[in-house]
Amino acid sequence: MRPLTTTRPTAVSDRLAVLPQYLMPKRALTAFAGRIASARAGTLTTALIRRFVARYNVNMSEAANPDIASYASFNDFFTRALRTGARPLAKADLICPVDGAISQFGAIAHDQIFQAKGHHYSTAALLGGDAAEAEPFHNGHFATLYLSPRDYHRIHMPCNGQLRRMVHVPGDLFSVNPTTARGVPGLFARNERVVCFFDSANGPFVLVLVGATIVGSMATVWHGLVNPPRPGKVRTWDYADQNIRLKKGDEMGRFLLGSTVVMLFPAGPLRFNPDWVPARAIRLGEAMAWRKPK
């Protein structure tokens, strides 16, 4: 008689927890949240921001402008700049590009990126199905970083780079919180995302801005708002002849409401910060990795 197979209770509970997301009108909710976030409603906007600051314990002393009442819209508040010196840059080959928490990081197994226990997705799927662009990252390295609502939501460069290409990939708008990452297969390769390809002195690398439920839009410093619009098809911009260069620590983009960043680096020696573990809180500018073994 064959033994009965059992499923890990946590895995079952994670899948059950995300079931409502398959049914909810995620795109309509996102559009509605975008309208609320961009509204300039005076005292109502200020009240919304104050409630958000209190609910998520946002540290406004780090903001370049700590005056809550001065923000005309929730988006203006949410994408607020940090005061000078709030995030010093570590002496490392790669610095952490965001405030947030570590989802996963490590080696890419041929073309497979680890999402959560029992879930992997391919580099080509993440990059919008482009196998040629994905090939340099086979057996390379990845880092997936989650930005919670309370975090600073601008994204900065982990190292010096020259922008080569940007691709907007349409997709779902599942939440990207840890429970959803455990419960939705291929989450980061199925959600809407903006893929930014860079060249550097140490080869190519990719920064992927992953959308989520109620993430009103994503923007880059060279393009402005990428979405909306959401035309439902892959859009590509080529920048190879424009000499757009960004330095380590420079702002490269931002989320209007929270989400996730996925980075890909090519094969070769790369030593991640030994203090890094999944779920650990991280800050922009701290050491992420070194290219040479210790």
Image (tube, helix red, strand yellow):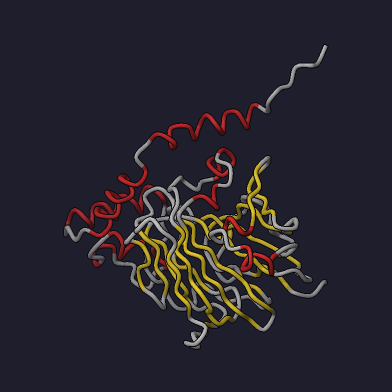
Percent x, y of residue 78 = 36, 61
Instruction: Give the percent coordinates (x, y) of residue 18.
Output: 49, 35
Report the residue at 56% width, 58% height from top: 129
Say if 258 sits above or below 239 in the image: above
**192 to the left or right of 261:** left
Query: Residue extending furthest top?
Result: 1
Q: Pick the residue in front: 142 or 186.
A: 186
For this orientation, the residue located farthest to the left is 42
**Observer-nearest residue: 275 or 141?**
141
Relative image position of residue 292 (x, y in whole percent) = 79, 75
Q: Quadrant of residue 183?
A: top right
Look at the image and tell me in which quarter the C terminus lies.
bottom right
Query: For the point 19% across and 53% down, which residue is it?
Result: 44
Q: Is residue 40 above or below residue 4?
A: below
Q: Give the number of marks.
A: 0
Q: Residue at the location (41% across, 78% down)?
A: 222
Where is residue 223? Give x, y as percent.
Answer: 39, 75
Q: Quadrant of the N terminus?
A: top right
Residue closest to the eye, 147 or 215 = 215
| 43 in relation to 236, above or below | above
Q: 242 or 91: which is nearer to us?
A: 242
Q: Which residue is at 55% across, 32% downward?
A: 15
Q: Judge whether 135 appears above or below 11 on screen.
A: below
